């Protein structure tokens, strides 16, 4: 499996990732406050019927993010769950 | 002393507030924002204290207009509402994220209480934490555990306010209070705090090996591409069935009670202006406010359940992508659909939308959705101008027209939203970032208090405006310049004698001729040149003006003008009279073109002072309701005019 950095938006459901960085944006501080910090493990849970927004597990709670928000988060997959 | 209650959303902050204050709550305004300030009274060992409920936020620093109050009041010791004590509700099942806000508030150096809530959920998720460890993290905070949903911890929390620890300058993180526009500083602050929180929590929190999101299985169905929407549609249908089935009973009762009370008052008081004011202005005016309570209460009863269970956030999740291109939010769906019953609770339900622009757009378009008050107007007009024919083998033309009017309302709401998206400028960037709480059984106490709060807001805040306007409308319909009204009455009596009318027929004639000569009658006649291009005469003009009180008043006004009894049910005499009414040149007034034009007018026009009063209340300014009145008026006039031209 290829371990490459990519944006959270492109991660498939069920995949666990680790946050590498958050792009500079006025939304960055908001994402940080929701608990999405560097090194944090996230799990992509499911997506809304049109593929947007997506729901992720952030340390035990479910957060929904629009794709435009998930795009700001650079992650690296650490474990693949089928 | 004044205690500020803070906390993240979905931590059970409302439950804690309700648990501590019960029914001793008052709703007010925070200065400058649209969020409600709930203040409750709290007895601690015989002393009276004040608990102020602040909006739920994830951080001390504001992200949206309504969150500003937390920062503005707590960073300014001179502010009027500056608390003596802060209490922060912390979700024990999600310590890490919750401790950001707590640590920020802790560093304000006010006596601080941590209410560690939802301890049962934490236990269910096999999260164990060491409260003594937390006490070491925040040595100058008082920490209590509670489970407000099941009403445990009340006395513990109260006692904690009596055992406050003195602040001696302990800080969780060294640093200054930041400026609210210093985003970079806030980013660093959040990162540094989370780093410290994470390392401290490692020692005191042990979670289950495999963290399982407990609600994933249910979510697989509820956000499913097919079942998700299907279930939502089903739930909506059930809610509407309930509202239509159950709201009608108390509404008829209220209607009847006020009518009886009014005529009873008239019978026991001596005749005069004051009696008239009371029996025809004030009592029906209050009745006009009270009549909305069943719908508001029922709708919020269901919305509160959906919210309490956590389902509402799933609805937002599946609707967000569909609503976004229109400048709306996933959360707009509930206000818009509620408006099909009545725009008043619809506009009030827009409160949940945190983005100001999306909220304003939702409020601005909600009254275009066809509300139940339009039904009597539509059915009357359809009965007059649309023939009852079957087309396409099974569809009734009249039903089809009614459906078309509903579609017209919905489509225009969406189109106007799209236009407003481009017109309204905002500095705030729209975002979703919505927490989807785990599913819970609703707490009936919380549901009940929500319903009570919404009804109170409507009756006190909007009710006053509604009452004032209904008294003005009554005065305009009852009085006229000079002795014109008396002369009209004399004429009517004379005619009644000549035509040998029965008592009820003659009183109908008197009412009709008095209305014609009243100020409203004069207004209706003077706007005739303006409404003539739409195909209306002055009689319709009068009814359009009076129906500003509420759309359904149109039917009653028409009945008065045509001097027929308003039987309230089938309106058969009125339909016959209207069908036969002719212009001076002998052509019928209610042609297909004029009738359709009038229906289109009612589909668009802001003929509801109650909604305007609520919009004023919810946006805290006259700007939005007046804009709404204006744009809907223009839309109504142009729409009706075009319809009339096309069909005639």
Image: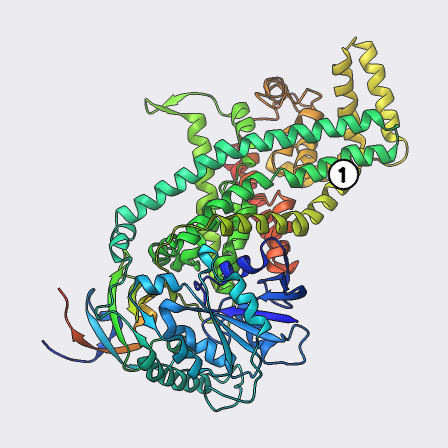
Judging by the rendered image, the residue that carries numbered circle 1 is B282
Q: Is residue A17 left or right of residue B594?
A: left
What subunit carries mark 1? Answer: B
Q: Position of residue B103 (x, y in %)?
A: 46, 80
> Please, is residue A17 above or below residue B522 in the view?
below
Residue at x-position 74% and y-position 36%:
B283
Q: Is residue B249 above or below residue B300?
A: above
> Residue B91: image x %, image y %?
41, 67
Task: Locate residue B143 relative to residue B220 in the image: left or right.
Answer: right
B614, above or below B57, in the image: above
Q: Residue visible at 47% across and 22% down? A: B387
| B237 relative to B579 in the view: left or right | left
What secondary structure is found at the residue carrying circle 1? helix
Q: Residue furthest left?
A: A1
Chosen colour scheme: rainbow
Position in image of residue B491 (x %, y %): 85, 20
* Quarter of the view holding residue B569: top right
Q: Nearer the viewer, residue B618 or B642?
A: B618
Tell which residue pokes out farthest to the front in this image. B45
Please indicate, yes or no, whether residue B597 appears anywhere in the rendered image.
Answer: no
The answer to whether one can see residue B56 in this image is yes
Q: Is residue B242 above or below residue B588?
A: below
Extreme residue in the right direction: B483
């Amino acid at each position: 499996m290829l371990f490459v950095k990519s944006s959270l938006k492109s991660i498939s459901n069920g995949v666990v990732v680790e946050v590498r960085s958050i792009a500079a944006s006025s939304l960055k501080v908001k994402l940080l406050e929701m608990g999405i910090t560097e090194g944090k493990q996230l799990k992509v849970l499911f997506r809304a019927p049109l593929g947007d927004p997506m729901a992720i597990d952030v340390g035990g709670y479910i957060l929904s993010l629009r794709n435009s928000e998930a795009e700001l988060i650079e992650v690296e997959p650490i474990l693949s769950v089928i | 002393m004044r205690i500020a209650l803070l906390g993240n959303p979905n931590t059970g902050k409302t439950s804690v507030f309700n648990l501590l204050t019960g029914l001793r709550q008052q709703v007010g305004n925070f200065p400058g924002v649209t969020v409600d300030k709930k203040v409750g009274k709290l007895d601690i060992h015989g002393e009276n204290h004040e608990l102020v409920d602040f909006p739920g936020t994830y951080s001390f620093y504001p992200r949206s207009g309504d969150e500003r109050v937390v920062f503005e009041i707590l960073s300014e010791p001179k502010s009027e509402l500056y608390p003596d004590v802060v209490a922060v509700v912390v979700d024990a099942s999600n310590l890490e994220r919750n401790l950001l806000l707590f640590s920020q508030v802790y560093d304000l150096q006010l006596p601080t209480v941590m209410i560690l809530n939802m301890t049962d959920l934490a236990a269910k998720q096999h999260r164990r934490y060491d409260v003594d460890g937390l006490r070491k993290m925040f040595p100058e905070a008082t920490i209590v555990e509670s489970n407000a949903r099941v009403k445990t911890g009340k006395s513990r929390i109260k006692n904690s306010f009596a055992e406050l620890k003195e602040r001696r300058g302990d800080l969780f993180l060294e640093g200054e209070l930041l400026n609210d526009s210093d985003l970079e500083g806030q980013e660093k602050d959040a990162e540094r705090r989370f780093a410290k929180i994470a390392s401290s929590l490692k020692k005191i929190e042990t979670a289950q090996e495999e963290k399982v999101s407990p609600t994933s299985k249910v979510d697989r169905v509820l956000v499913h591409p097919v079942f998700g929407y299907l279930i939502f549609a089903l739930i909506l249908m059930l809610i509407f069935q309930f509202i239509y089935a159950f709201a009608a009973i108390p509404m008829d009762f209220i209607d009847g009670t006020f009518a009886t009370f009014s005529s009873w008052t008239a019978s026991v008081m001596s005749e005069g202006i004051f009696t008239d004011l009371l029996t025809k202005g004030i009592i029906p005016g209050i009745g006009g406010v009270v009549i909305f309570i069943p719908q508001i209460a029922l709708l919020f009863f269901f919305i509160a359940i959906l919210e309490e269970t956590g389902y509402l956030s799933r609805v937002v999740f599946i609707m967000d992508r569909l609503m976004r291109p229109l400048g709306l939010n996933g959360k707009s769906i509930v206000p818009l659909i509620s408006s099909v019953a009545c725009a008043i609770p619809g506009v009030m339900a827009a409160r949940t939308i945190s983005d100001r622009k999306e909220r304003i757009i939702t409020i601005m378009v909600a009254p275009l959705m066809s509300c139940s008050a339009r039904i009597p107007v539509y059915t009357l007009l359809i009965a007059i101008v649309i023939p009852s024919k079957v087309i396409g083998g099974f569809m009734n033309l009249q039903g089809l027209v009614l459906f078309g009017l509903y579609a017209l309302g919905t489509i225009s709401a969406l189109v106007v939203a799209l236009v407003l998206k481009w017109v309204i400028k905002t500095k705030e960037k729209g975002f979703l970032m919505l927490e989807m709480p785990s599913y819970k059984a609703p707490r009936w106490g919380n549901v009940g208090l929500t319903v009570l709060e919404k009804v109170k807001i409507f009756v006190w805040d909007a009710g006053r405006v509604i009452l004032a306007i209904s008294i003005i409308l009554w005065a305009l319909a009852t009085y006229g310049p000079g002795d014109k009204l008396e002369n009209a009455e004399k004429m009517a009596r004379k005619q009644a004698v000549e035509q040998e009318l029965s008592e009820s027929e003659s009183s109908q004639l008197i009412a009709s001729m008095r209305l014609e000569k009243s100020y409203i009658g004069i207004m209706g006649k003077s706007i005739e040149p303006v409404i003539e291009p739409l195909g209306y005469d002055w009689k319709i003009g009068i009814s359009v003006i009076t129906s500003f009180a509420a759309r359904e008043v149109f039917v009653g006004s028409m009945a008065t003008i045509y001097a027929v009894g308003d039987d309230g049910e089938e309106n058969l005499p009125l339909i016959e009279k209207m069908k036969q009414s002719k212009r001076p040149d002998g052509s019928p007034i209610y042609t297909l073109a004029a009738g359709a034009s009038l229906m289109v007018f009612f589909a668009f026009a802001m003929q509801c002072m109650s909604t305007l009063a609520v919009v004023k209340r919810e946006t805290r300014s006259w700007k939005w309701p007046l804009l709404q009145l204006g744009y809907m008026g223009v839309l109504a006039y142009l729409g009706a005019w075009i319809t009339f031209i096309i069909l005639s």
